[in-house]
Structures are given as C-alpha cells and as structure tokens.
Image (spheres, grey):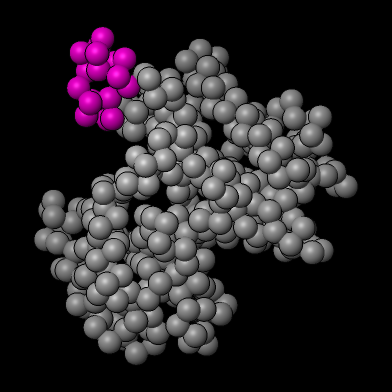
Amino acid sequence: MLNAGSSSIKYQVLEIPGGECVRQGSLENIGVGGPADHEEALRIVVGEVGDLAGINAVGHRVVHGGSRFIEPTLITAEVEEHIEALSALAPLHNPANVAGIRAAKKAMPSIPQVAVFDTAFHQTMSDAASTVAIPTEVAQTWGIKKYGFHGTSHQFVSRKASDMLGGDPDQHRIITTHLGNGSSMAAIRGGRCIDTTMGFTPLQGLVMGTRAGDVDAAIIPHLIKNAGMSLSKVETMLNAQSGLMGLAGSSDFRDITSRAQAGDEAATRALEVWAWRIRHYIGGYTALLGGLDALVFTGGIGENSALGRQKATEGLEFLGIVVEDSLNTLRSGDARLVSPSGATPVVLVIPTNEELEIATQVADLVGEAR
Ligand code: ADP
C-alpha cells in the first residue's frame, strides 16, 4: 500500500491473508533535496520492492472521497479525474494522492491500482448527522456536509472491538477514539458509522496537536474585522497553531503530560481542555447510540498514554465507563481490556493498523487474496 503526501511517500508490502508486512519504507523530502518528484520516488520504491511478480495490486490511501466514493475503488482514468476534482475539498492532501497514483501507474503499469478513502467508512451517516445547517442550496452547490476522516482506522479498530465483544456484531454499539496528532472519534452501530467528530475537513471536532477542533465560526470574521488578521492567517492559526500547541506551546502529548505532572499551568490547562472535549463526545455518542458496549482507544496517544485515557474517561462512571488503574498503566502493544472485568461498557485499547486495513480491502476488491 502507498501513502503519498506532498513531500513524502510511505509504503508497505503486505501479504494477504495473514497480514504480514514483508517490506516497508519511506521517502522524504520529495522535490526539496530528496527525489525530484513523485515519479522518481516511485522508481526508487519499485527498486526497493524488487520483484514485482508477487504484487497483486497497489492500494492508495486517498484522503477525500467526497460523497461519491463509499468503498475501495479500482482506479480508472475517470476515477483519477474525480479524485483530482475533490482537491477543492482537500487541497492539502488529494493533489499529493493523485501524484502518487499517477507515478505508481507509470512505474507499475500492469498492476491494478485501487484507491481506499479516508472518508468512505463515514458515508453511512444519516442525513441528520451529516447535514450542515446552512441554506440547503449553498450546501448542495458546494458539497458542504460532514464527511469525516480517519475512516480506515475507525473501521479497523471497531471490527476488532466487535470480535473482542463476541455475540451478534449487528447489535454492537461502539465509540472509537483515535487520538494522534490528528484526532477524531466515531460512533458505530452494527459496524456502520452513525457519527464522527471531524467534518467537512479534518479541522472539526476534538482538540488536536495543532488544530483547534470545534470553534464558533463567528470567531473567524471577528478576528478578520477586529484583529487585523488576514483570512489565510486565521486559517493557519486554526490548523497549525491551535490545539495543544496553541494552549501550551507543544503539540507533543508526551511533552504536555510530563509538564502537567510537574505542575506546569499551561500544560495542565491544555490537558483539561483536551479531555473535556473527548468526554463531551463520549456522552453525546452514547446518547446517539442508545447505550454503549465498547469504548475504544487507539492512535499514538490512545494506545500509549495511560494518563490520557484516564483523563478522557474521568467522571463517566455514571455511564458505567471505568478504567482500572492496574490494567490502564500496564504497557503492551496488544489489543487489551483496561476496564475492570465484568464491567460494561468495556474500555479497550486497540492498536490501529491502517496499512493492513487498506491492504485487506484492496485484496478483497481484486479478489486475489492468496
Ligand atoms: P499521527 O496522527 O501523526 O499518526 P500518532 O498516532 O503517531 O500521530 O500520535 C502522535 C502522538 O502520540 C504525539 O502527541 C505523541 O506525543 C503521542 N505519543 C506517542 N507515544 C506516547 C507515549 N508513550 N505516551 C504519551 N503520548 C505518546
């Protein structure tokens, strides 16, 4: 599978079924000192992979699939055009994804190329959940609605959670909490997403490393009119200088927690604001799901920070949500239970694996799983 960014490409070669990663690598600084462009980068990737005879398909991570792409899709010329057209909705990501696709097609012309979209899993949201309450005509003309992102991760960990719960997966009510540099949550009933915290772009929802998450939209014109800030300055502020960075000067959660534990005021406050937003959504999603069977933590913070999980669930005992200290502080790379045995809902830590999820979906599509 290939994950092409504007100046980097990451790849993994995975065996499906089984899921073993037999080769992986990444190329950085494309166009800025490293490979000249995505084409040259792909030639290097193909060189590193070696024998292409064993490669059945290439899966591309594509950030925005709009309303049109709701499942993994074989990339034809028409599909490529549509992904490119969706750049208006994801200007930071889709153009790089398209560059990766074009380069891969050139470097491996006889191998099927498949796009797997970050938005796809969320397209089961109801109209009520995904509608932005601006005039309908404006929303329709400009494609404005909640799309949601991190879909492959939410799908992967929710399926694992369902396996761990046992019983009838159609009945399972699960909240997945993906906490990394970018963070989002999803409410999932019977394997289908009913709501998620990211929106039209990945800016909405939780307090993230550098993104503000939910803000009153009126703040934007207020700053432009009164603080003399340009629109692009406000955009940069909300995406790159806010969240934990804006509150405590660092986007690194390890840094925030160690400073908070040492009594640093800004870091303590950042942690409280961060956790408040997560708890707010846990409560809201439990209501929308009509109850809860499993709360799942994943992503760099969700998988590794015992303090993060503890703060994010503080005071939710009335919902049955409890993390057991002795289990929560145990370090492990495995999927595991951190709530007391017998408690419902269960609280789980499940390491995500978006690469494996993409490869599995691609193998299902091309029907050549070996
Ligand atoms: P990305 O969204 O870029 O994929 P990750 O999922 O890798 O990011 O998450 C990065 C975040 O995870 C950082 O804020 C980092 O500080 C945090 N993190 C990683 N390891 C730990 C740890 N052991 N304890 C606390 N936070 C951690």
Whether residue 179 is visible here, answered yes or no, is: no
Q: Residue at x 50, y 21 (%)?
A: 270
Position of 318 with respect to 49 (left or right) is: right
In the rendered image of this protein, does residue 192 appear above or below residue 290? below
Q: Main secondary structure of the magenta part?
A: helix
Q: Nearer the viewer, residue 136 or 320?
A: 136
For the N terminus, the image quarter is bottom left
Position of 147 with respect to 60 (left or right) is: right
Residue 232 magenta-highlighted:
yes
Q: Identify the residue at the far right of this view.
A: 342
The image position of residue 291, as x and y in percent, is 77, 43
Whether residue 239 is visible here, answered yes or no, is: yes
Q: To which quarter of the image does residue 262 belong?
A: top right
Q: Residue at x 25, y 58 (%)?
A: 85
Magenta segment boundaries in residue numbering: 220-236
The image position of residue 351, as x and y in percent, is 58, 54
The image position of residue 125, as x and y in percent, is 56, 51
Residue 150 magenta-highlighted:
no
For the image, the number of numbered tags is 0
